[in-house]
Amino acid sequence: MGASTSYRTAWRSRTIAALVASVASIAYVQCGGDKSPTPTQPTVPPPTTVLPIPAPTPTPSPSPPQIFVGAGDIGWNSNGGGQEQTAKLIDGTGGTVFTTGDNAYLDGSARNYSDWYNPSWGRFRDRTRPVPGNHEYDTDHSMAGYFGYFGTAAGAFPGYYSHELGDWHAIALNSSIDVTGGSPQAVWLRGDLATHPSKCTIAYWHFPLFTSGPNGNQPQMRAIWQILYDNNVDVIVNGHDHLYERFAPQAPDGFPDPVRGIREFIVGTGGALLYEIVTNMPNSERRIAGVHAVGPRLRLAVHPGLRRAVRCRTRDMPLSDVTRSAGLAPGPAVKPSSRDRPRKPGRSAPTPRRRARAIPC
C-alpha cells in the first residue's frame, strides 16, 4: 500500500512538471523570448531604369575672324581724288566694307554719288555698311542722295543702326544730328548696347572726339563716348580729318585706360584732298598724313575665356604698309575749309553755295 501510494505520487509529480514545461514553452513562443516575426521571403525591388548621362554641352567655337575695312571722306569731286586708288586696295580684301561719312563731295547729292562715288567704291555697294557725314546734309536735310544710293544698307532715317560681324557687334551712328546724352539717338544706343552686353563691339561715325588733325577735337561727341565707355565698347572708327590716326585705349576724358578704355581710329583717307597733322594729341600712337588709303583694315577676332581686353582683339594694317604694298604715292596735304566745321545739333543744313573752285572739306 505504501509503495503504491509512493508510485502514484511520483507519477503525478512527473505529469505536473511536464505540463508546466509545455505551458512555459508555449508562453515563451507567444509572449516573450524571440519577438521576431515569422520570416518571409525578401522583397525584390523593382528594376531601376538607368538614364544615360547627358553629354556636356560643347562650348560653341568662335566664328572666324571678320574683316572690316573702309575709310571716310571718299568721292572727291574732281579727277584729282584718290577714291580709285583706295578702291583698288579693297578689291583684294574680303569682308564687310564701311564708310565713315562724307562719302560723295561736295554735297552728298544723288549726282555726286553717281559721278564721284559709284565709279570706284560703288563696286562694293552690296557689302558696304555706311554712315553719313556733314556733307550728306548739304543738299537737303533728308539725306536723299545718301539713302537713295545705299538703300536699306544705311538703316532707317535718320541714319543710325547696328549689325553683326561674326561674333562682333557693330554700331553705326550719325554724328551730324543731336548727340547729347538725352537725344533719341543716345536713348536708342543704350538700348542696343543693353541687348548685346557680352559681345565685342565696334562703333563708327564721322566726327572724332580726339584728333591731331586741323579740325580739332569734337567735344559734342563726349556724351556718346561716355555711353560706349560705360558699356565696354572696344573700338571706335571716325573720319572728318583727312588723315590716318590710331589712339591707345583711353577714357572719354582723354586719360589713358589700358584696362577698359576704347581705341579710336581716324580714317578720313578714302579719296578727298588730304590734311596735315597740326598737333600730336595725348595717347596718339600713330599718325600718317598725305596718303590715300583704306584703314584700319581691322581683323576682328574673339578669344573665348579671356578677359575682354584680350578676348576682343583687333589687328590693324597701318596705312604706310598698305600704301607701300600697293605702290601708292603720298598726296599733298592741305588745310580744311570752314565748310568742314560741324553744325550745332538740331540745326538744318544750310543751302550750299556753288563755287567755281573745289574747296577741301
Image (cartoon, grey):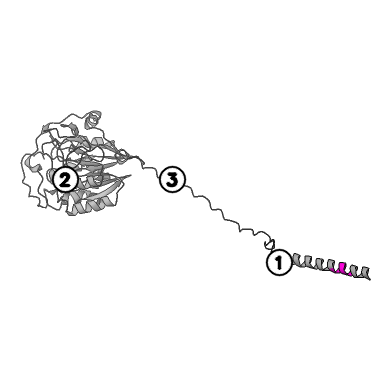
The answer for how far apart the CA atoms under marks 3 and 1 are is: 67 Å
Q: Earlier in the sequence, mark 3 or mark 1?
A: 1
Residue type indicated by callout 2: Arg
Residue 212, given in percent of the width and then of the height, sits at 14, 35
Q: Earlier in the sequence, mark 2 or mark 3?
A: 3
SS class of the residue under badge 2?
helix
Q: Position of residue 233 (x, y in %)?
A: 25, 44
SS type, badge 1: helix
- Sort mark 3 into few (<14), some (14-19) or many (20+) by Cα contacts within 10 Å: few
Q: Which residue is mark 3?
A: 58
Q: Quadrant of residue 60?
A: top left
Dot label at residue 30:
1
Position of the N terminus, as image quadrant, is bottom right
Between label 3 and label 1, give the one nearer the viewer. Answer: 1
Q: Is residue 89 above or below residue 202?
A: above
Asked if 263 appears above or below 323 in the picture, the reply is: below
Q: Depth check: 267 or 224 in front?
A: 224
